[in-house]
Image: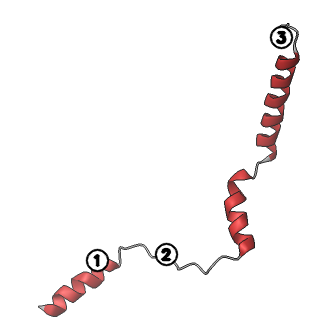
Amino acid sequence: MVLDVFKDVVHALEDVPYRKPRRPLSNLERIQECCRSLVLTDAQLHRMMIALERSMEEGLAKETGRS
């Protein structure tokens, strides 16, 4: 009976996903991990440049300027 329970527990553990423990990160790796979301692709940077340029042109236009 105890052996059957043990077998059931072991069988149930086979379905639990295993994550390899991570080694401690160096300072450089921690900084890179924090900054990863700030890295832009060329396409993203290009879209941002276009949006910024349009906003600046709109802000400098006579129609939107202060009198």
Q: Residue 9: percent from the left, percent from the top?
A: 25, 82
Image point (18%, 92%), residue name? 3
The nearer-to-camera label among 2 and 3 is 3
Q: CA distance from mark 1 to mark 2?
A: 16 Å
Q: Residue 17 is drawn in which quadrant?
A: bottom left
Separation of marks 2 and 3 at Cα, in angstroms: 60 Å
Give coordinates of residue 43: x percent, y percent.
Answer: 79, 41
State yes or no: discs 2 and 3 in contact (Cβ < 8 Å): no
Instruction: Give the percent coordinates (x, y) of residue 38.
Output: 72, 51
Quarter of the rendering occupied by the N terminus: bottom left
The three-letter code of the residue at mark 1 reads Ala
Q: CA distance from mark 1 to mark 3?
A: 71 Å
Tag 1's secondary structure? helix
- Few, some or many residues within 10 Å of mark 2 (<14, 14–19, 20+): few
Q: Residue furthest front?
A: 67
Residue type highlighted by circle 2: Arg
Residue type at the position of mark 3: Arg
Residue 10 located left or right of residue 62: left
Give the labeled residue for mark 3.
Answer: 66
Answer whether labels 1 and 3 touch (C-beta < 8 Å): no
Q: Quadrant of residue 57?
A: top right
Q: Residue at x 71, y 71 (%)?
A: 29
Q: Residues within 10 Å of mark 3 (few under 14, many from 20)?
A: few
Q: Secondary structure at mark 3?
A: loop
Lower position in the chain sequence, tag 2 or tag 3: 2
Q: Nearer the viewer, mark 1 or mark 2?
A: 2
Disc 1 designates what residue? 12
First in sequence: mark 1 or mark 3? Answer: 1
Q: Identify the residue position indicated by label 2 in the image.
A: 19
Circle nearer the viewer, 1 or 3? 3
Please tell me which residue is depicted at 53% across the width and 80% down the height of the picture.
Answer: 21
